[in-house]
Structure formats: C-alpha cells, structure tokens
Image: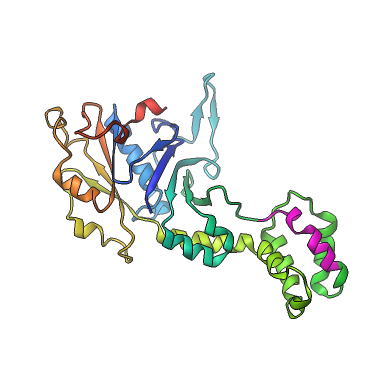
C-alpha cells in the first residue's frame, strides 16, 4: 500500500491544509519553520506508527481550542476532531482478500484513514458505503415477515417495521436483530427468493468491521528516521512480519541539509531507499529541492 494524499486539520502551530498529493517513491515537503515541519512529521506518522498513540500522545502539545476568523476561540471535542487524514491505494492482493469477506469490497481502489485528537483511528473505503440503509431491505423484510410471522425473534422485526425510517443505517442492534431473525429462516432459504442477498445487506456493517481489521494489519508502518543516520535498506524493509509490506519512511532532513548541498542530486542513500520504500523528506525553506521534478516538491506553507 502506498500513501497517495495527506490532509492536516491541525490546531495551534500545526497547519490546516488542503490535500497534498504525494509521489509513490519520493516526495520532498518544504517548511519555512522546522519546528512546524517536525510537528507535521509526527502527525503524519500517527496514521500507523510503530508505537501506541494512546501512550505516546503525539498530539499532547496541541491546544484544545481553535481561533476562528473573527478572533473568537472555540473549544474542540477531541473525539470529533480528526488531525490527519491519509488516502492509500489498494494492491490487487489486498482487494482480493477484502472481496472474500464481502463482494462489494471487490470495488475497493482507495482507502481513507484518519487519526483523531483523542488518538482513536477511523478507516473508510472511499466511495463504498460501509452499511446498508433500511430502504434497501425493508420491502423484502416486510414480505418475509408476512410469510413467517411467528417466533421470538420476529417480535423485534415487527417493531422495526413500524419504527425504522428509510434512511436508517443497518448496524448495531438493528443489524443484530435482523441477522438473528434471518438465521432462524435459514433452513427455509431454498424457498426464499434472494435470501443470500438480503442476508448480505444485513451483515454488511459487520463484514466491513472485519475488513477494517484486515486492512489495519496490512497498513505499512510509518517510520521516522534521521537524514544523517539512515539505516540500511535491508533493516527497514523487514520491519513488518510480512515482507510484502514495506514501510513509509519519514526522513527528517532539517539539520542535515544545507543550502550548498541542495543543488545536487538526491543523496544516494535516500535514492536507494526510495526504490524500495515510499519516502517523505521533511526539509526547511532553504532547501532547493535537489534535482526533483516540481511535482515531487511540496511547499506546505502554500497549502494552508
């Protein structure tokens, strides 16, 4: 998996940006202030760090309020404020495994992952709904309830038929009640038209939860390394138990890069790493961008 884009919704000195498009090999992120650059590095790493965010608290120095355009201050709910969002591509092997959980996930081409201010993480499948709406099954459920009205589980479904509205998402207790009732009808599934499809829609939210767990295991780790002390490629690419999962390297070049050096080509060690791992290099405003194409050099301050 490669990181395609990032977006920050920072507080205090951590910036709020538009979407930043990244190269799948090497991107240079340039900052006028190295302190802010290191804050951004830490925020990006929080998408999937080698440490536990709840223990390390990478956002611990961020304020719990934001200043609005009119100068007023507004408190921020940590459980509602996403600080960093990343969009990843999905290799074909991953899509195959996701689709084995539920057929709708064969359509996966990108996933979106965010880390909130309270350190919880969310995962979405871009442009694919993670749960069905009541309107998608209500007609079929009503027909089945008319045909099979008896049983303890059926009482909960009678209640749903009167209380649920078309836009309701089938998840939580609603999904559990529907799945439990449909399971009692499984011995008669040969008599029921579209039984597998109805059950699939009801179980969609649960299947997507399983898919998120699978995806979390396949995410590349985000490793912060110093530009002056880069470890060997062989050491970095074995950081995961799965050799197919290569890390994303966040390379701190703030102190190692000087104006006289920036006119040269990309340093050999970084160039070698970029052939195996996706690399994001964090540099100061004096850096000329080595000899990288403009598309691989991002002026982060201009994205605020």
Q: x and y percent of residue 96 in the render?
A: 47, 64
**Residue located farthest toward the bottom when viewing the structure as drawn:** 187
- Magenta segment includes 137: yes
**Residue drawn at the location 54% of the way across and 22% of the way down:** 72
x then y, percent, for residue 176: 69, 66
| The residue stretch that appears in magenta | 132-145
Between 182 and 160, which is closer to the camera in this rendering? 182
Which residue appears at 40% of the width and 56% of the height? 219
- Asked if residue 52 is positioned above or below residue 9 in the image, the reply reads below
> Is residue 172 found left or right of 29 in the rendered image?
right
* Dominant secondary structure (helix, strand or loop) of the stretch shown in magenta: helix
Q: What x and y, as percent, mark residue 207? A: 58, 63
Q: Quadrant of the N terminus?
A: bottom left
Most extreme residue toward the left, as rendered? 260
Q: Is residue 10 above or below residue 130?
A: above
Q: Colour scheme of this structure image? A: rainbow
Residue 257, compared with residue 102, is above or below; it is above
Residue sitting at the far top: 70
Horizontal and vertical percent position of residue 254? 22, 35
Q: Quadrant of the C terminus?
A: top left
| Residue at the image point whose x is 48% and y is 65% from the top | 97
Q: Is residue 230 shown in magenta?
A: no
Residue at 86%, 74% in the rendered image: 150
Q: Nearer the viewer, residue 38 or 233?
A: 233
Q: How many marks?
A: 0
């Amino acid at each position: 998996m490669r990181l395609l884009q990032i977006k920050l919704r920072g507080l205090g000195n951590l910036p709020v940006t538009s979407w930043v498009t990244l190269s799948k090999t090497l991107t240079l992120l340039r900052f006028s202030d190295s302190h802010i650059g290191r804050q951004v590095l830490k925020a990006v790493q929080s998408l999937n760090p080698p440490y536990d965010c709840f223990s390390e608290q990478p956002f611990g120095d961020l304020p719990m309020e934001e200043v609005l355009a009119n100068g007023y201050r507004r408190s921020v709910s940590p459980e509602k404020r996403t600080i960093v969002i990343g969009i990843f591509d999905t290799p074909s092997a991953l899509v195959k495994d996701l689709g084995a959980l539920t057929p709708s996930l064969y359509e996966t081409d990108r996933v979106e992952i965010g880390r909130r201010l309270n350190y919880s993480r969310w995962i979405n499948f871009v442009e694919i709904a993670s749960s069905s709406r009541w309107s998608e099954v209500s007609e079929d459920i009503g027909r089945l309830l008319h045909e099979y009205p008896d049983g303890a589980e059926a009482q909960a479904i009678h209640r749903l038929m009167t209380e649920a509205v078309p836009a309701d998402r089938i998840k939580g207790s609603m999904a559990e009640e529907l799945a439990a009732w449909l399971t009692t009808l499984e011995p008669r599934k040969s008599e029921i038209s579209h039984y597998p499809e109805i059950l699939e829609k009801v179980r969609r939210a649960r299947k997507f939860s399983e898919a998120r767990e699978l995806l979390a295991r396949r995410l590349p780790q985000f490793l912060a390394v110093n530009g002056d002390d880069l470890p060997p490629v062989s050491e970095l690419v074995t950081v995961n138990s799965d050799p197919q999962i290569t890390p994303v390297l966040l390379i701190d070049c703030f102190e190692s890069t000087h104006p006289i050096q920036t006119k040269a080509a990309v340093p050999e060690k970084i160039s070698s790493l970029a052939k195996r791992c996706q690399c994001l290099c964090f540099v100061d405003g004096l850096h000329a961008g080595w000899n990288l194409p403009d598309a691989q050099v991002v002026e982060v301050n201009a994205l605020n």
